[in-house]
Image (cartoon, rainbow, N blue to C red):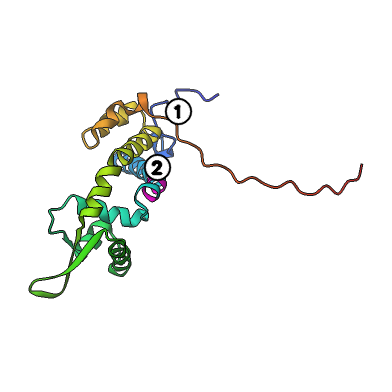
Amino acid sequence: MADPAEHPTDLPSCPSAQGAGLLPAELRGWMLLLAATGAVEQRLRSVVKERLDVSHDEFLVLCLLAEQPREGLRMTRIAELLGRPKTRLTYQIACLQHAGLVTRKSVCGDKRGVEVALTDKARRMLREASDALAETVTGALAHVMGPEQCAAMSGLIPKTATATATAPEPTPEPEPQLQPEPSTVSD
């Protein structure tokens, strides 16, 4: 069994959490954020697909638009915020539009500008799925972060302060069942 002094229970398994390496605190913190982000995204993918029937990247677009007034956002701004190429975003928006989740319209006075907004259907779907999505985020963070880190994160995500005490263990992915190979030895 590992010595608790070597790996305190309130720190994630990310090597940067150890603090004994060459990285300054800022880079260690950034690495912890990346580990937490990865854990959240990994868990969210299946919940998003099950609840909203969209890809993870399409979900990110929906989340950005959900925080906007009904007018929506320009596609160039969405691409900037997500750090995605405009061509990739165009495909995602087309899929969302085909599903009836967003609308596209030309920006007045700018023949190249396109603005994207959520439909009422998308708003309703996000509202209905929001509790399950929020629980997924909180649970993933609690799994990766310890109590002290969750308390620090609670300014951004309030429920993380108490998440470690109540977070369910992640459900492991079922492993594929291997078929036994035919025996070549005769009895």
Q: Where is 108 relative to 28, above or below?
A: below
Residue type at the position of mark 2: Ala
Picture coordinates of residue 44, whole percent (x, y):
37, 45
- Say whether disc 1 or disc 2 marks the residue closer to the N-terminus: 1
68 or 130, which lies in front? 130
- Chief SS of the magenta region: helix
Residue 17 coordinates in the image, percent (x, y)? 39, 35
x then y, percent, for residue 12: 41, 34
Instruction: Give the residue drawn at x 28%, y 28%.
Output: 161
Depth check, mark 1 against mark 2: the one in front is 2
- Residue range (magenta): 43-49
* Residue 47 belongs to the span the image colors magenta: yes
| Amino acid type of the residue tagged 1 in the rendering | His
Q: Secondary structure at mark 1?
A: loop
Residue underneath mark 1: 7
Label 1 and label 2: CA atoms lie apart by 19 Å
Q: Quadrant of residue 28?
A: top left
Tell me if 120 is positioned left or right of 53 in this view: left
The magenta stretch spans residue 155:
no
Checking the image for residue 134, the label placed there is none
Residue pictured at 12% horizontal, 53% vertical? 69
Residue at the extreme right of the image, as rendered: 187
Q: Which mark is residue 39?
A: 2
Determine crowd level at label 2: few under 14, some 14-19, many 20+ residues with C-alpha closer than 10 A: some
